[in-house]
Image: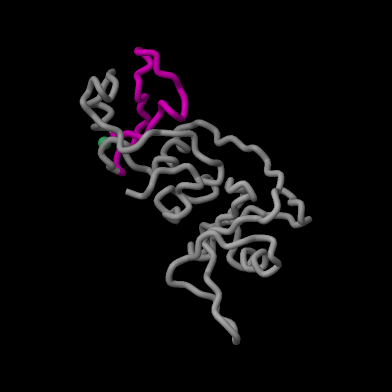
Amino acid sequence: MFSTAYGHSFTKISLFSQNDAVAVLVLNYDYQPVHITTWKRAFTLLYLRKAELVEARAGRVLRTVRKEYPWPSIIRLLRYVPAPYKQVPLNRQNIFRRDGFRCVYCGSPHNLTVDHVIPRSQGGTDSWENLVTACGSCNHRKGNRTPEQAGMALRYKPRRPHYLLFWLRGAEEIESSWRPYLMLEPTR
Ligand SMILES: [Zn+2]
């Protein structure tokens, strides 16, 4: 939880029990993601002109007696709000999460392991850029080789994820329009 320049407290919301359509991505004034909020809070920020609509959710509108409003998917704060710098811990579960619980080589969701893209024996490090989710058979086939040496291609380039990713259950549930802001690859 953190306070904003507006004096509001943003509380981390659980998306597990809620309909995915309620979640709205909040960008800071500089377009960096700062928060995920509820649609009610997003409408309030828009109504008070503290935020602007960046992306509407297709197929949904808010109807009032007088008119219809686009349903927000992404909003942007109209004043810069100091945001805490948070790092995502580099561990097995978070690597799986970043990769959407799928093998980066073949896309399989089964028998997942962590693979060093460049093997440690060839100077590969433990880093977000060098650790990926791989199924057991791809990991076995690749062995102690680089993808080039093994003739295997990664479906995307692994990167350090944005911490907001970890407020969501898994990468497969993220709105496709949110992905560029969270530094994720486009949906396959
Ligand atoms: Zn695989």
Looking at the rendering, which quadrant does residue 49 occupy? bottom right
Front residue of 50/43: it is: 50
Front residue of 16/4: it is: 4
Q: Which residues are magenta?
A: 109-135
**Where residue 30 sits: x, y (%)?**
62, 46
Q: Residue at x 45, y 55 (%)?
A: 177
**Where residue 148 sits: x, y (%)?**
25, 23
**Where residue 160 sits: x, y (%)?**
49, 34
Ligand number 1: quarter of image: top left
Q: Residue at x 43, y 72 (%)?
A: 59
| Residue that sits furthest to the right in the current view | 7
Say above or below: 181 vs 53: above
Front residue of 6/131: it is: 6
- Side of 14 where 79 appears, left or right: right
Q: Residue at x 48, y 52 (%)?
A: 178
Is residue 121 magenta-colored?
yes
Say above or below: 66 vs 50: below
**Where residue 111 sits: x, y (%)?**
30, 38
Q: Residue at x 53, y 45 (%)?
A: 166
Is residue 141 magenta-colored?
no
Looking at the rendering, which quadrant does residue 6 occupy? bottom right
Say above or below: 23 vs 161: below
